[in-house]
């Protein structure tokens, strides 16, 4: 039996392509859940909640939020570059460095919320 590509619809071909790509997608989700990377991502989410709380209750000014968000974005870009360079993972040294940077941002959030 011959099957002609013209007999397949675009959605069917797209689904087949997605199924072929599934192993790499699961590998990416595994790397996303790697303990060092998960810790950094958890800290970033927690700090975002603290920033949102500061905005809600008025303890953070718009200028403070812009400055903190800029720092957060820089750390996220750094994490992505390092993860990309290491096949989806962070080394211990990179993890320590990112955590030091997140500690500094955390102190900034605290000081800005309490000034």
Image: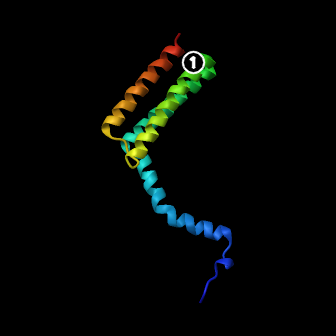
Q: Left or right: where does residue 99 sit relative to residue 70?
A: left
Instruction: Check the image and name the residue furthest to the left.
Output: 92
Quarter containing the N terminus: bottom right
Q: Residue at position x 45%, y 35% from top?
A: 78
Local SS, label 1: helix
Give neighbour class at mark 1: few <14, some 14-19, many 20+ (Cα, 10 Å). some
- Between 110 and 105, the one lying in front of the other is 105
Task: Indicate the quadrant where residue 43 lies.
Answer: top left
Left or right: residue 10 versus residue 98 is right
Residue that carries the numbered disc 1 in the rendered image: 64
Closest to the observer, 91 or 54: 91
Q: Residue at x 41, y 43 (%)?
A: 83
Relative to 14, 77 lies left or right:
left
**Residue at the limit of the structure toward the top, as seen here:** 115
Q: Is residue 110 above or below residue 48?
A: above
Give the image location of residue 98, x and y in percent.
39, 32
Q: Position of residue 60 (x, y in %)?
A: 58, 17
Residue pictured at 64% horizontal, 77% vertical: 5
Q: Position of residue 21 (x, y in %)?
A: 51, 63
Q: Position of residue 56 (x, y in %)?
A: 63, 22
């Amino acid at each position: 039996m011959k099957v002609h590509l013209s007999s397949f619809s675009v959605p069917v071909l797209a689904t087949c392509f997605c199924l072929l790509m599934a192993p790499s997608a699961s590998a990416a989700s595994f790397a996303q859940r790697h303990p060092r990377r998960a810790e950094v991502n958890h800290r970033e989410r927690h700090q975002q909640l603290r920033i949102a709380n500061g905005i809600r209750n008025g303890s953070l000014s718009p200028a403070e939020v812009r400055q903190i968000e800029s720092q957060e974005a820089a750390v996220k870009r750094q994490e992505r570059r390092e993860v990309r360079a290491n096949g989806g993972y962070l080394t211990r040294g990179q993890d320590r460095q990112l955590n030091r940077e997140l500690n500094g941002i955390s102190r900034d959030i605290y000081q800005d919320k309490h000034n």
